[in-house]
Amino acid sequence: MTRNIRTGKDAEIRSYYRAMYRAWGPQHWWPAESPFEVIVGTYLTQNSSWTNVERAIRNLRDAGVLSVDGMRNLKRSRLERLIRPSGYFRQKAQRLKTFISFLDLRYEGSLEKMFAQPTHTLRGQLLDLNGIGPETADSILLYAGNHPVFVVDAYTRRVLNRHDILREKTDYEEIRTLFERALRPVTEQQEHVREGDGLRLESGFPGIVHPPSAMSTAHRTAQVQVYNEMHGLLVGVGKFHCGKSKVKCDGCPLQRFLPKAKDER
Ligand code: SF4
């Protein structure tokens, strides 16, 4: 049987985390003022750039409808207009309305009640909703609900694939399990939690760092914080170094882990 993930990679994943964190520090991802804003963002960011998501979110905020009540009372046609900058706006409006109906039906419109569910139960319910795949479900669980699940995205796959750790078509759950297992010891030894605790960065983040937001500075467990940072840091590597067609290894905090570089040591 062919393995999709090379064995014995847990320690390497931990080294990636430490190298990226030392280089760039906290990423303050997900930038949002409330759990509901995170949820809306997870829908809007599907097939869209974050800049366009921000424009749509701003429209919703300016219209005073960036809340469960606001969106419930909003006509779908108006919702479509407000989120138009994020693309696929008809489909996304319908999916957001579906989420509100689910919340109303199962949890009396309460995100608190929803997030009080065990992770496994809620994950299954979210995955049953139209428009929610594993990445969206896990983003909602981790960033809006502080549930300890790792979010696997295209950037993560690309980096691990280029570093010869996994095959391109590796199953989402396999990668999630790898990260959750590998990062557990980091959580236990975690000495940093927030910025300003004496961390001296080795290099500057190459892009725009998100300013601290209500959600990125909210109280959370060390485990959730590590999953949060790891995902944000991999997004940074994917965006600014490890592009789909443009790869800039010079200056990338993961350069020393490249299989070729390792062979030469
Ligand atoms: S840019 Fe180069 S060093 Fe950085 S993750 Fe991609 S392949 Fe690795």
Image (cartoon, helix red, strand yellow):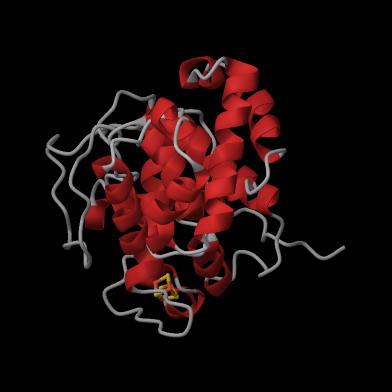
Residue 177 falls in which quadrant of the image? top right
Give the residue at x 33% y 44%: 60
Give the x, y percent position of residue 66.
35, 36
Report whether 175 appears left or right of 225: right
Q: Quadrant of the N terminus?
A: bottom right
Q: Is residue 163 above or below residue 63?
A: below
> In x, y percent, where is residue 24?
23, 56
Horizontal side of 98 relative to 37 (left or right) equals right
Q: Residue at x 64, y 20 (%)?
A: 105
Place of residue 164 in the rendered image (x, y in percent of width and height, measured from the top left): 59, 71
Let me know if residue 150 appears in the view: no
Asked whether 236 or 254 is in front, the reply is 236
Residue toward you, 209 or 242: 209
Q: Residue furthest bottom?
A: 245
Residue 250 falls left or right of residue 245: left
- In percent of width and height, residue 46 lies at 51, 58
Question: Do we see residue 35 in this rendering?
Answer: yes
Q: Nearer the viewer, residue 203 or 12?
A: 203
Q: Nearer the viewer, residue 123 or 160?
A: 123
Q: How many marks?
A: 0
Residue 180, quarter of the rendered image = top right
Q: Where's ligand 1: which quadrant?
A: bottom left
On screen, 137 above or below 131? Answer: above
Q: Residue at (58%, 35%) from the top-left corner? A: 99
126 sits left or right of 27 in the view: right
Quarter of the image with the C terminus is bottom left
